[in-house]
Image: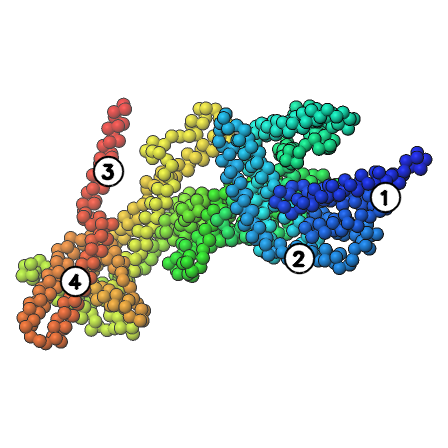
Amino acid sequence: MIFQACVDQRFDDPGGDVSVSKNSAFAEEFAYNIRTIFANVESKLGEPSEIDQRDKYTGVCGLFVLHFHIFRTVDKKIYKSLLDACKKVPAVTLAANIIWFPDTFLINKVPAAAKLVDKKSIQSIRSSRDAYLQQKAQTLMKDMQSYYIFVTSWMMKMESILSKEPKPDKLSEDLSNRCNIFVQGILYAYSISTIVKTTMNMYMSMQRPMTKTSVKALCRLVELLKAVEHTFHRRSLVVADSVSHITQQLQSQALASISTAKKRVISDKKYSEQRLDVLSALVLAENTLNGPSTKERRLVVSLALSVGTQMKTFKDEELLPLQLVLKKLDLISELRERVKVQCDCSFLYWHRTVFPIYLDDVYENAVDAARIHYMFSALRDCVPTMLHAKHMESCDQLLECYDTEIMEILNEHLLDKLCKEIEKDLRLSVHTHLKLDDRNPFKVGMKDLSHFFSLKPIRFFNRFIDIKAYVTHYLDKTFYNLTTVALHDWATYSEMRNLATQRYGLVMTEAHLPSQTLEQGLDVLEIMRNIHVFVSRYLYNLNNQVNFTYQFLRKKFYIFSQFMYDEHIKSRLIKDIRFFRETKDQTDQKYPFERAEKFNRGIRKLGLTPDGQSYLDQYRQLISQIGNAMGYVRMIRSGGLHCCSSAIRFVPDLEDIVNFEELVKEEGLSEETQKAASQLDCVLGDLTSNSAEGTEYFKMLVGVFAPEFRSVKNMHLRNFYMIVPPLAVNFVEHSISCKEKLSKKNKVGAAFTDDGFAMGVAYILKLLDQYQEFDSLHWFQAVREKYMKEMNAVVKEQNVQSTSQDEKLMQTMNLTQKRLDIYLQEFELLYFSLSSARIFFRADKTAAEETQEKKDRGWLDGSMISRTFYGDI
């Protein structure tokens, strides 16, 4: 509209005798300049050295329309040439997403000339737009790859040239190299900018769909554009220093050419006013070049040389180098502005729909994730334009909407996907033993996402986007929340944290969960799994758990006592005791193995349960249950000690704890600080008392039941030590049966260990103070001798029968030897388990010795107190 208003205004002034439209000389000069400018522009359109020819082409078309509106004449030849140039330049981006089609402009603004051109030519020009887009869709990827090589090579040359110290003897050559590399950077920036702007704006203006491949290629070109800008910016100090020296060198070269021409004019003795004007113009150009290379001075030089180059003052081989030098002078003098304009990507605001596709591509190709910095730099270019927005009350609102939109896209298409993938990878890696899916990278093609975590924070608006911190926070939050929901999975998430640190370098935060659980008391499972749980009233809760064990044991011991009181059992045990006392000299003080087997068979004759168990089987199970309860308490004890030690590890010396409340009061600190110090003292007191007291749970459970077991009314329990050998035989047979079921299809009742029996026997022997009585049987020595004797007999028989060819007999002997090995091994395992279990109950001391030890300790403590007391007096 502005242009239309300009060309439609009246240029003639009849009252002032000014008639522009009738001025034939002006019309001819006007047309001549259009032809001259267009000739210079057309030769460079589409060439690698093109830099601002498209803008000049737009200006030429505007001048042609102005010429038509003033003089109402049309140069058909130049009009056709202008239209033909549309095949090279189907569209020109004027600003942002504003695209200008020269053919439409010329046809609409000069309708009289359009009638002179045949419709086929006009149609072919218009169809060239579609052809251009089709060609770009096919060549865009190749162009991107070519420019990628060009720009990266240019960046390396730039770094190399600017890093070298210039040598005094090669200063001119070095400046020429720097000048050429700077100009080359501007040319690359212009070419890339033209391709991206023209292609994207034409797709949008013509409403044509763009393929994902084209979008990715265009985004790559945008990155290259910003890479050029960042290279200039990164070396801006060296570039600024070089520019001043390069301009001086170019001015010197221009002055040398002008001086040669000036001498030629002066040496010509033919005087004329035209020659004087030419000489004056050359002198003016010389004087102007002797100074700073400002925009005004360069404009004066250009105007002066437009006069000074007339009358063949310059030879052809002199004029072209001079024009090239002046062009370089323009580019180098405006280097910063040119780079800023050519690398400006504010047009992306109107094409931000491609951003999700770009982020998907970055995610899929994580190896070069660092390129995302260039894209965000391009997205920031539209901010200065948005600050001048007039269609809204506040431009801050527009900026906020844009910021929110970009961040939502980034979260959805990159950050959230990255978080989910990292979490999935950690989870599957930790659970590899479950064999959930194929993790072979050669088959599934796994991505290395660790490149995202080596990125520096991305600057966008007034924030920095730290991908590493974002993912770390997500994992910390997720692991914490999931651990609170399922506390038993704490170890899994702890392992995932460690793996995240090893594999991705993520510094995870420990989930310092609160000590309480959903239940009233302490969840013992958490202690057994060694979870980092701190309980303020640890002993109280733990005693609750031990109290439940006590109630359970009381019920079981009632059944235990009734079994031992049964006449069948009691009478058999009395017989065995009498037999052992009478025959121990003949049996080398060892309880015979055959006697234990006979006891087993005798109990079995008393009857079986529906599932085929004897009374001794049930009694063995009862003792195993008692032992398992003790094992449970042992796990509580281990977990409690671990928990207490973890909670108190920050206290340097448990024996010498400072009273913080007194120290704070001495310093005269605030009341709040004194309260905090008092609470700290209470916490430390609880911790020290909990770590020092109440951990001897076995001793506690022995002390509760021992007096009752050893009382006169429970005399029938004193025969217990004699039933241990039959129980051991019964247990070994049961254990072998359970282990054999492991290799069978039906694994009901299968097991590979049951240390509860050994724990139960050791506990009951301690309660009855019968360790010495049991040891006097030398039971396990008798078992070992019995099986060794049988195994030696089998070996001798094998040696005798080795000469015979009876294979079945040899197989039978081998099986017999194997069975004896298995039985001996099971008895040995039972012996080891029982020996280990006895350690927990201090089997080395009898009840009388423990009582005497308590008395001695009490006397010693009393004497120490009295000695201290009298010593103080």
Task: Estimate the spatial distance between the alpha carbons at disc 3 and disc 2, rounded to whole Å.
Answer: 107 Å
Residue under circle 1? 71
Q: Looking at the image, which residue is at 30% across and 48% down? A: 697
Name the element at disc 3.
helix
Task: Estimate the spatial distance between the alpha carbons at disc 1 and disc 4, rounded to whole Å.
Answer: 124 Å
Label 3: few (<14), some (14–19) or many (≥20) C-alpha neighbours in 10 Å? few
Task: Estimate the spatial distance between the alpha carbons at disc 4 and disc 3, rounded to whole Å.
Answer: 46 Å
What amino acid type is highlighted by mark number 2? Ala
Marking on residue 363: none
- Mark nearer the viewer, 1 or 2: 1
What amino acid type is highlighted by mark number 4? Leu
Visible in this render: residue 386?
Answer: no
Q: Quadrant of residue 721?
A: bottom left
Residue under circle 4? 824
Residue under circle 2? 131
Of the image marks 4 and 2, the number of the one nearer the N terminus: 2
| Nearer the observer, 126 or 481 | 126
Name the element at disc 2.
helix
- Looking at the image, residue 659 sits to the left or right of residue 142; the answer is left
What amino acid type is highlighted by mark number 3? Gly
Name the element at disc 1.
helix
Residue under circle 3? 858
